[in-house]
Image (cartoon, rainbow, N blue to C red):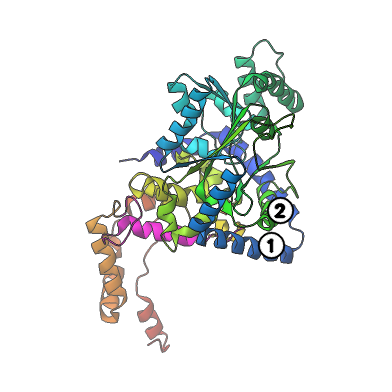
């Protein structure tokens, strides 16, 4: 049976425009990242430092979250814990209902994608409007983000111009990038004035001060978090760091790894709602801290490294598989290498275990990751978990990929490779029977030619040459 992932990937490979658009943007992002690191030493040092910061934060996660909660509350920020996506959605809904709000304006938030917030709110009669340009475009197209920092990278200028013209025929058609951005700005601006609730994601949370940090380039995140009277930030629990001094190195490595920028255009630090005497800012600030499987990863020594991720997308931009099939083929919120280790942990190997196979294990993702997540090792670990039959494994959906015949075959292969007599006999038999062996080997030979076996084994050839090979 062909899986959904295989169908999506096959279809993406046949779409020339997807390939062209992907190549154009991903290459540009890679070039910018490379140009941002002039000195390799600087990159290595900063990477070591940032890895240590994130390791420390993940190691102390429970304490830091408690400290964060205490300080957020002291600052006047309302804290909501959500164990599941459903709980997080209900928290947002109840805040909206309390304020009798029918529209929520949103800055970019991958966690809100994770919990499918827009769809949930729509079912309750509330409109969610994306204000990040890329998110706005894909919302109009009725699609999901194809990338975590450039959600509409699979669309070119003409496709975006046609999309905007279809939805807003009152404005003149243009393919000029600046004019398109101005147009979206004009359309969105009115909504900022009237929305009672704004929602954003969070890049980092500082435990020692109870501060939410938001990194963005368009200024829409700042508007969503300051203009409406109520600001809701939704975030995964892993975004916490211990100290304020952890932020500058993380910010530097994040922007350079993501877009090659030495610094982002806007960096927001939200520490409290509007104070008496202040003229602007929200009167209420809420933060929704989402678990949704993260604490299961935290409890596993190896998988906990996944929680270090700062969502820079460098691994995605360097993945040869992503570059060919694009983000939608994965069928997940987070695509690419980080998605292939994250989604099976959060949503189960039974549903997303196949993604762990969507990798050549070339290791490019591990090499570019600014916080040193061993992505290739984790992919291998999850592949193993998918076939494990022991009760020790807590990864959701563990064992769902177990195929008894396959396991028996690998055991036989391992036995043969560790017994020289059996190995020699089997290779000798294979060379002698090569003409009757099948030239097809399942999906492996769909895109490859079966290698031809030699007439004699290597041992026989060495022996004939008089070379001592024992
Ligand atoms: S895994 Fe590493 S490279 Fe990939 S998004 Fe996360 S921090 Fe960036």
Tell me the quarter of the image containing the N terminus: top left
Above or below residue 416? Residue 137 is above
**Is 328 within the magenta?**
no
Q: Is residue 282 left or right of residue 309?
A: right
Above or below residue 387? Residue 192 is above
What segment carries the magenta color?
371-398
Q: Is residue 411 left or right of residue 98?
A: left
Mark 2 and 1 residues: CB-CB less than 8 Å, in contact?
yes
Residue at screen point 42% across, 45% down: 292
**Is 394 within the magenta?**
yes
Q: Where does residue 205 sit, x and y in percent of width and height?
A: 60, 48
Residue at screen point 55% across, 62% down: 55
Residue at screen point 28% across, 60% down: 437
Is the CB of the residue bearing disc 1 within 8 angstroms of ligand 1?
Answer: no
Above or below residue 455? Residue 134 is above
Q: Where does residue 149 sit, x and y in percent of width and height?
A: 61, 41
Q: Where does residue 107 sit, x and y in percent of width and height?
A: 61, 33
Q: Where does residue 72 sit, x and y in percent of width and height?
A: 58, 45
Residue for badge 2: 252
Secondary structure of the residue carrying numbered label 2: helix
Residue sitting farthest toward the front: 276
Residue for badge 1: 46
Q: Is residue 460 visible?
A: yes
328 or 418, nearer to the observer: 328
């Amino acid at each position: 049976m062909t899986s959904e992932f295989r169908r999506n990937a096959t279809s993406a490979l046949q779409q020339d425009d997807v390939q062209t658009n992907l190549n154009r943007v991903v290459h540009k992002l890679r070039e910018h990242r490379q140009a941002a690191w002039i000195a390799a030493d600087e990159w290595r040092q900063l990477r070591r430092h940032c890895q240590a910061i994130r390791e420390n934060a993940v190691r102390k996660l429970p304490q830091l979250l408690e400290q964060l909660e205490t300080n957020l509350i002291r600052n006047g920020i309302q804290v909501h814990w959500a164990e599941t996506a459903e709980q997080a959605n209900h928290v947002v809904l109840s805040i909206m209902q309390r304020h009798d709000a029918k529209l929520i304006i949103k800055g970019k938030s991958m966690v809100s994608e994770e919990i499918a917030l827009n769809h949930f709110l729509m079912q309750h009669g509330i409109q969610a409007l994306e204000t990040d340009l890329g998110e706005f475009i894909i919302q109009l197209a009725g699609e999901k983000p194809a990338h975590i920092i450039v959600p509409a990278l699979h669309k070119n200028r003409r496709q975006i111009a046609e999309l905007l013209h279809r939805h807003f025929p009152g404005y003149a058609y243009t393919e000029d990038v600046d004019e398109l951005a101005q147009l979206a700005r004009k359309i969105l601006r009115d909504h900022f004035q009237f929305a009672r609730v704004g929602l954003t994601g969070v890049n980092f949370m500082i435990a020692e001060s109870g501060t939410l940090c938001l990194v963005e380039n368009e200024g829409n995140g700042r508007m969503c978090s300051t203009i409406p009277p109520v600001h809701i930030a939704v975030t995964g629990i892993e975004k916490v760091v211990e100290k304020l001094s952890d932020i500058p190195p993380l910010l530097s490595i994040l922007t350079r790894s993501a877009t090659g920028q030495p610094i982002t255009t806007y960096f927001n630090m939200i520490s409290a709602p509007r104070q008496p005497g202040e003229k602007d800012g929200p009167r209420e600030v809420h933060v929704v801290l989402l678990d949704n499987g993260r604490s299961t990863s935290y409890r596993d020594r190896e998988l906990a490294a996944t929680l270090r991720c700062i969502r820079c997308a460098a691994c995605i931009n360097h993945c040869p598989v992503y570059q060919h099939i694009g983000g939608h083929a994965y069928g997940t919120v987070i695509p690419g290498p980080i998605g292939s280790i994250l989604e099976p942990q959060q949503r189960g190997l039974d549903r997303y275990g196949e993604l762990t196979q969507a990798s050549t294990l070339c290791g490019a993702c591990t090499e570019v990751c600014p916080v040193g997540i061993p992505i290739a090792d984790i992919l291998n670990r999850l592949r193993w978990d998918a076939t494990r039959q022991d009760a020790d494994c807590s990864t959701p959906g563990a064992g769902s990929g177990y195929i008894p015949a396959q396991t028996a075959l690998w055991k036989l292969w391992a036995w043969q490779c560790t017994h020289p007599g059996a190995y020699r006999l089997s290779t000798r038999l294979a060379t002698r029977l090569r003409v009757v062996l099948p030239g097809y080997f399942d999906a492996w030979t769909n895109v490859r030619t079966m290698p031809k076996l030699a007439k004699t084994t290597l041992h026989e050839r060495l022996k004939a040459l008089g070379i001592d090979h024992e």
